[in-house]
Image (cartoon, grey):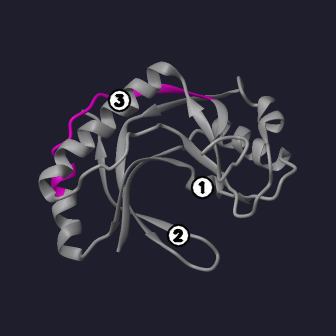
Amino acid sequence: MRTFVAIEIDTQNILQKIKSLQESISFKAKHIRIDQIHFTLQFLGELENSKVEEVKKALQQIHFSKFELSVIGSGAFPNTKNPRIVWVGVDNIGTRKLVSLAKNVNSVLKPVGFIVDKPFKPHLTVLRIKTKVGDITNELLKFKNVEFGKQMVSKIILKESVLSHDGPEYSNLVEVSST
């Protein structure tokens, strides 16, 4: 099964502002469903059931204190001149805490066989761009400093992703709550 470790966004104010961003764009892009907006702490890929059980046990070793972060600003990967993904970001304090939590996830999953191949960059993917749309710098400028709201982070979730022609469907495999 296809899996990843995530933090869900469930603050309605944040989700409504993300929906407004999605609806205001003029270029062609696929909207990420509002109920699927999340931070991916670590993508694990396709796993056998036995490996999923190992991952669940490893994740339950994680201890972290709940924290609040501010969702703020927007941008694009790899950049706004040739975008493939439009994202919403996080304040500096939230970034540091999310990076720390991602390192914690990585450290418990490393002995189970997972190695992170690139640095974690906290972001919420809100749009996917399949076709060339050109420079979207000016369009994203209006969201550069937008404060989408605050979210309390009190759990991480191992999620399964089942791909279909309508897009991915997520389900929770295990939740790890803050201490």
Q: Amino acid at mark 2?
A: Glu
Q: Amino acid at mark 3?
A: Lys
Q: Nearer the viewer, mark 3 or mark 2?
A: 2
Q: Residue at x 73, y 43 (%)?
A: 81
Asked if residue 160 is positioned above or below residue 48 in the image, the reply reads above
> Helix or strand or loop: what does disc 1 sit on?
helix
Residue 59 falls within the magenta-colored stretch: yes
Q: Quadrant of the C terminus?
A: top left
Task: Please indicate whether residue 74 sits to the left or right of residue 103 in the image.
Answer: right
For mark 2, does the 10 Å Cα neighbourhood hold few (<14), some (14 to 19), or many (20 or more) residues?
few
Instruction: Give the image location of residue 31, x and y in percent.
Output: 71, 57
Which mark is first along the chain, 3 or 1? 1
> Helix or strand or loop: what does disc 2 sit on?
strand
Q: Nearer the viewer, residue 139 or 165?
A: 139
Say which residue label 3 marks: 66
Q: Amino acid at mark 1?
A: Asp
Residue 94 falls within the magenta-colored stretch: no
Q: Nearer the viewer, residue 60 or 131?
A: 131
Q: Residue at x 26, y 44 (%)?
A: 105
Question: From which residue to which does the magenta span run?
Answer: 57-72
Q: Residue furthest top?
A: 93
Q: Residue at x 19, y 42 (%)?
A: 107
Say which residue label 2 marks: 169
Asked if residue 138 is positioned above or below residue 47 in the image, the reply reads above
**Marks 1 and 3, how far apart in space?**
22 Å
